[in-house]
Image (cartoon, helix red, strand yellow):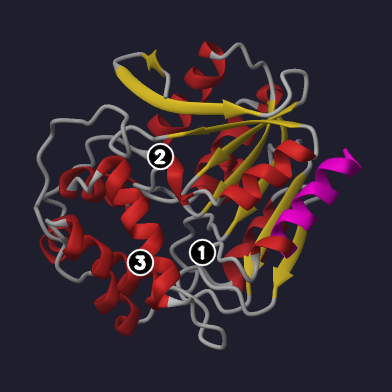
């Protein structure tokens, strides 16, 4: 796949769909490579006439990695953050600036942004600070980072802070454990499907513990963006699962209340992931939103 330099960062990307189609930039969750996007979703966008850009964040996938060392486990990292002894090597604003740099490199003046989790957070920053570059914003399973919003339960945090993997076998099991924990309770994700996805990701880029942790630090340390969201003028759709144990419906409602004219779509039974059983509804709602523009 091609790469571009954005400042001192090298980003891996892929672009598909009709050359004259509406530009759509997809932004994944924390430390998630571009191969996590499901082919049926990408194909549906392409068939709808979209020119689709996917990419690896810095510190993820096949893009370049930072060198700043951080504590090598989730519990150590969380303790260091809580004590004030750890400063994030970069922040969500830097990741958002990378997206603008990628769009510049690809000669994309404006695009429809679809962001999942961390990607939704970046979309908020981009739509508020670079309004002329954002044709529309779709924020999925994201938050405003308002500290008063509900947080994951202690039980969920135990699942999210399990020892990080070093081998493919460990990674496949870890990925399946984590995404089972963050998935729907009424319709748990199929473990075999999660394991297949994990194997695909490992074969693409392996797993870099330090890159993963640096990404999480950036997301966890993000400042409350509520005040900046009132500046967003791009049409905005907020999609939220009703059984998301990581980001609550309140987090989705906070975005809708802060962003002028934002719409809210709740997906019954969806957790903190885009699984095959929920993807058709999310895809159709997103495409319908784009057709309204």
Q: CA distance from mark 2 to mark 3?
A: 29 Å
As drawn, 103 above or below 282:
above
Q: CA distance from mark 1 to mark 2?
A: 20 Å
Q: Are marks 1 and 2 in contact (CB under 8 Å)?
A: no
CB within 8 Å, label 2 to label 3: no
Q: Earlier in the sequence, mark 1 or mark 3?
A: 3
Of circles 1 and 2, the one toward us is 1
Residue at position x 19%, y 57% from top? 168
**For residue 13, side relative to residue 261 (left or right):** left
Instruction: Please identify, in this view, whether the residue under mark 1 or under mark 3 is nearer the observer.
Output: 3
Residue underneath mark 3: 195
Q: Which residues are magenta?
A: 281-293
Q: Quadrant of residue 197?
A: bottom left
Q: In the structure shown, which secondary structural element does the residue marked by tag 1 occupy?
A: loop
Quadrant of the rendered image containing residue 135: top right
Mark nearer the viewer, 2 or 3: 3
Q: Secondary structure of the magenta portion, mostly?
A: helix
Q: What x and y, as percent, mark residue 23?
A: 70, 27
Which residue extends farthest right?
Answer: 292
Extreme residue toward the bottom, this view: 186
Image quarter of the N terminus? top left
Query: Badge 1, how many Cα within 10 Å: few under 14, some, many 20+?
Result: many
Residue 36 shows in the view: yes
**Where on the picture, by quarter, is residue 21?**
top right
The residue pinned by badge 1 equals 273
Q: Residue shown at 45%/41% (left/top)?
A: 34
């Amino acid at each position: 796949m091609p790469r571009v330099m954005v400042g001192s960062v090298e980003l891996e990307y892929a672009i598909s769909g009709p050359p004259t189609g509406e530009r759509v930039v997809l932004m994944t969750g924390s430390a998630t490579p571009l191969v996590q996007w499901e082919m049926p979703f990408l194909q549906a966008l392409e068939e709808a006439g979209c020119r689709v850009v996917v990419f690896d964040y810095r510190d993820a996938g096949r893009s370049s990695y930072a060198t700043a060392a951080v504590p090598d486990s989730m519990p150590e990292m969380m303790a260091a953050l809580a004590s004030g002894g750890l400063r994030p090597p970069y922040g969500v604003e830097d990741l958002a600036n990378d997206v603008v740099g990628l769009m510049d490199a690809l000669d994309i003046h404006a695009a429809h942004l679809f962001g999942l989790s961390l990607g939704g957070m970046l979309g908020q920053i981009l739509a508020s600070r670079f309004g002329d570059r954002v044709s529309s914003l779709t924020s999925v399973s994201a938050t405003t980072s308002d500290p008063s919003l509900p947080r994951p339960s202690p039980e969920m945090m135990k699942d999210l802070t399990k020892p990080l993997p070093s081998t493919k076998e460990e990674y496949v099991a870890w990925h399946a454990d984590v995404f089972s924990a963050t998935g729907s309770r009424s319709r748990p994700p199929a473990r075999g499907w999660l394991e297949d996805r994990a194997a695909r990701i490992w074969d693409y880029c392996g797993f870099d513990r330090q890159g993963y942790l640096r990404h999480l630090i950036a997301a966890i340390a993000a400042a409350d963006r509520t005040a900046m969201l009132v500046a967003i003028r791009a049409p905005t759709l907020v999609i939220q699962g009703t059984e998301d144990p990581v980001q609550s419906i309140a987090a989705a409602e906070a975005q809708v209340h802060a962003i002028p004219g934002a719409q809210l779509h709740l997906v019954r039974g969806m957790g903190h992931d885009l699984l095959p059983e929920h993807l058709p509804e999310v895809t159709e709602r997103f495409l319908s939103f784009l057709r309204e523009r």
